[in-house]
Image (spheres, rainbow, N blue to C red):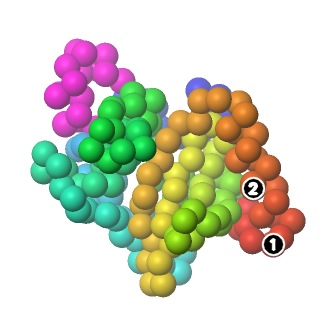
Amino acid sequence: MTDATSWLPELITLAEAGGDWNLYREAIYAIFCRDFLETKPIYPGKRFAMKRHPMALGKEATFWHLIQEGPVEEDRIPDFRRCERIRWPRPMIEGLQSGQVRVWKNIRGQSQRIVIAVSDFSYVVILDERDDSVLLWTAYFVERQHQRDKLAKEFAESQKAGAGNS
């Protein structure tokens, strides 16, 4: 882990489930349930929610967005970098005031999104902002440096405009 992520929980790997995808999926789903269904993170001034439907294999849509990647919903595939970091979204959401994350708002399509990134922009959590709530939308590892640079630029521009929080 980098210095930017050293404060976050340890990764959980497929090897810890003996290389068995089904066992691994259930293990990371248990973490998801603990962090987002059994209890909910606290987000300042808003109710925390998530997209539950469509359910697949008895698991909420948000869970699949946290562990899979791809532009076509029905064709998304597991992304092991996302899976390994399933423990990270909650502490990042709750760490908004800690200075360990960068937070700003952007517009994607018709939605106003809240982007929460570790300080080197290598991992982001995306929340969808609604009138009275925020929905956990997705989270992902940012693999390429040019993508990290683009996020850093977007964050810096939001700070100049006064739209960011930290």
For the residue carrying disc 2, how many other residues have a C-alpha within 10 Å: few (<14), some (14-19), or many (20+)? many
Question: Which quadrant would residue 39 be assigned to in this image?
Answer: bottom left
Which picture quadrant has residue 132?
bottom left
In the picture, the quarter occupied by the C terminus is: bottom right
Q: Earlier in the sequence, mark 2 or mark 1?
A: 2
Instruction: Give the position of the N terminus as an image quadrant.
Output: top right
Secondary structure, mark 1, is: loop
Rendered location of residue 107, percent (x, y): 61, 66
Position in image of residue 92 (x %, y %): 54, 52
Give the answer, above or below, for where 57 lies relative to 10.
below
Looking at the image, residue 135 lies above or below residue 28:
below
Q: Residue at x 23, y 34 (%)?
A: 25
The residue tagged 2 is: 155
Instruction: Farthest residue to the left: give it.
Output: 58
75 lies left or right of 143: left
The amino acid beneath tag 2 is Phe
Residue 99 in the magenta stretch? The answer is no
- Residue 14 within the segment the image draws in magenta: yes
Amino acid bearing label 1: Gly
